[in-house]
Image (tube, grey):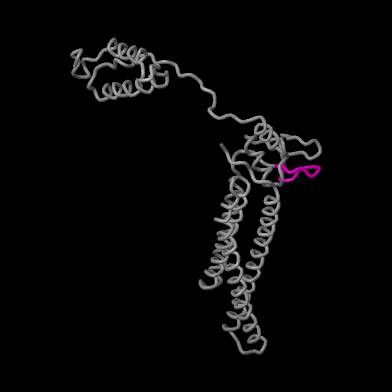
Amino acid sequence: EARSVLCPREVTKPILERYQRHLYHHRKADGKPLSFRAQYSRLIPVRAYFKWLTRQNVLLSNPASELELARLEKRLPKYVLTVEEAERVAADAARPPVDLADQAMYQAKRQGGNRISWYDPKSGGIRAGPGVGLRGRSGRYLVPGEGRPNWSLNVGTSGATCFLWGYLLYRGDLDTLWRMLGIVNQLLASTALAVGTTYILLHSPRRRYALCTALPFVFVIVTTYAAAVMSLEGWWAQVTGLEGKIAAGTLTGAALVAGQKQAFLWKLVCVLAVIMLALVSVVVFEAVRRWWSILREPPRAAAG
């Protein structure tokens, strides 16, 4: 109002430049001038406002389009590492991966493309080159980089899994498969909780946070194994009963054929359940062993 500027159409580039000079010469209550960043933060909304007015056809041209803003300075970090902290970080980065999982994460962060990288225990360094599998010569672990996904492997394994579940559903009954699916689902949940607990122990400055996943892990493992053993006992008892009827000659004709198919299905389900329980037992054993080795090491220092 002091300059008789009452609407956006009356604002020109010289007026905006005068406002910019006002910000440059302005002094705060303590007598210090505004920093370049503070001036920048006041001019950016002005530019955005006039740009929006031009897009809405309120203004025919943007008076702030040619306004030159102050270049922001590049500041140093507010908090820097001490000499001891820097040496600790450098030592941790130079330390070779502890196991295959750590090694895979170490390589995936640093390698890309379709090449294969590995850690060579003999030389203590990282090597890169074309790879042929998970394990290379001289016991070196090969870890693929961030290349293209193997669609043939993904589609093939997905198709095989769907086919096998469809076969079981076609040959069996829904009650048996539903209990089987429940066991599989809970075993998968226990595996995920084991991985989460390991990650928290490795990366959290407060290891007690791992109880958030470790306690549910113990509960899921105990209840799932108990339910799986009860289901196995029930299925095997039904197999024994059917085989007893078949041996005694009680079943004949179509009933005999149906009994033989049902006994085979229950045997197959028992075998698959035992295999899954054994594989998850290996995962649980390795997870507990890894937790023990982590807990024996000093905890990480809290960041900041």
Image position of 157 with respect to 148: above or below:
below
Is residue 274 at all visible to an observer of this figure?
Answer: yes
Q: Dominant secondary structure of the magenta stretch?
A: loop
Q: Residue 113: percent from the left, percent from the top?
A: 62, 34
Determine the residue positioned at 61% across, 31% down: 81
- Along the line of sight, which residue is nearer the eye, 39 or 172? 39
Quarter of the C terminus within the rendering: top right
Q: Quadrant of residue 138?
A: top right
Left or right, 103 with reference to 148: right
* Residue 230 image offset from top left, x and y in percent: 60, 75
The residue depicted at 34 percent of the width and 11 percent of the height is: 21
Residue 34's image quarter?
A: top left
Across and down, in percent, residue 140 comes to 77, 42
Residue nearest the viewer, comparing 204 with 159: 204
Identify the residue at horizontal 80%, vertical 35% (top origin). Answer: 123
Report whether residue 156 is seen: no
Magenta-tinted stretch = 132-142
46 lies left or right of 246: left
Q: How many marks?
A: 0
Residue 148 position, x and y percent, is 59, 39
Q: Nearer the viewer, residue 57 or 21?
A: 21
